[in-house]
Image: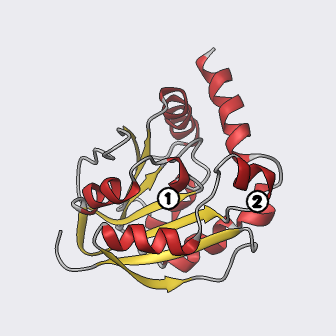
Amino acid sequence: MQRLRAAIKRLMYEGFGRDRWQRADDVVGALGLGPGARVADLGAGGGYFTFRLAEAVGSAGKVYAVDVDADLQAYIAGEREARGVANVETIRGDMDDPRLPAPVDLLFSSDAYHHIADRPAYFARARRYLRPGGRAAIIDHVPQGFFTGWLGHGTAADVIRREMEGAGFRLAREIDLLHPRQIFLVFDAAGSP
């Protein structure tokens, strides 16, 4: 039953045709992750980016699939076993702290930023888990249209910038790679956590 609930949730989050508009391989490539890097996939959901990130960092790297949803965590764990992927670890995060077990090079969030209630506080805490030179990459929907605007499933770029600056980050790059309905921003940690 848990697997069925997770599959339904995964479909709700990912929808149909996501590969076409999300350009996941291009996104991961733009992050420039090398072998041995450590990544926290914050709001990993059903693992859409998790396993692509795991491939990018190689067997010497690590990806922490962080989510608050037990069904989706179980789904990713099952996929990890089915795929034989050893460098993915599921982490049951809290709404105010990702609870990472070790420092990471990248905090990555795709289409989950708008779900976090107190984003500046969350990312200020998450920043403590960054290794020196660490970054944060945020992809979110532009708040327009019925689904994103009315239901709050999106965050404006200027809001993300302001909130991340409040959490101790500075904008390093705005990547114009995705469909106009999405924002892709990369931040550096401004000074030490």
Identify which residue, 79 or 11, lies in the foreground.
11
Compared with 90, 125 (above or below) is: below
Residue type beneath disc 1: Ser
Residue type beneath disc 2: Asp
How would you rate the neighbour count of disc 1 (Cα within 10 Å): few for under 14, some for 14-19, many for 20 or more? many
At which x and y percent is residue 80?
A: 51, 40
How would you rate the neighbour count of disc 2 (Cα within 10 Å): few for under 14, some for 14-19, many for 20 or more? few
Report the Cα–Cα distance between label 2 and label 1.
17 Å
Q: Earlier in the sequence, mark 2 or mark 1?
A: 2
Mark toward the viewer: 2 or 1 = 1
Provide the secondary structure element on which disc 1 rests: strand
Report the quarter where the C terminus lies: bottom left
Pointer 2 with pointer 1, Cβ within 8 A: no
Compared with 97, 111 (above or below) is: below
Q: Which residue is mark 1?
A: 109
Q: Which residue is mark 2?
A: 19
At which x and y percent is residue 128?
A: 21, 60
Q: Quadrant of residue 35?
A: bottom left
Q: What residue lies at 62% left-to-right and 23% top-to-bottom?
A: 3
At which x and y percent is residue 125?
A: 25, 55
Identify which residue, 152 or 55, lies in the foreground.
152
Specify whether 159 is left or right of 191: right
Q: What residue lies at 32% left-to-right and 69% top-to-bottom?
A: 166
| Residue 176's disc number | none
Can residue 128 be seen by looking at this rendering?
yes
Compared with 34, 83 (above or below) is: above
Report the quarter where the N terminus lies: top right
At which x and y percent is residue 59?
A: 40, 59
Q: What residue lies at 49% left-to-right and 68% top-to-bottom?
A: 160
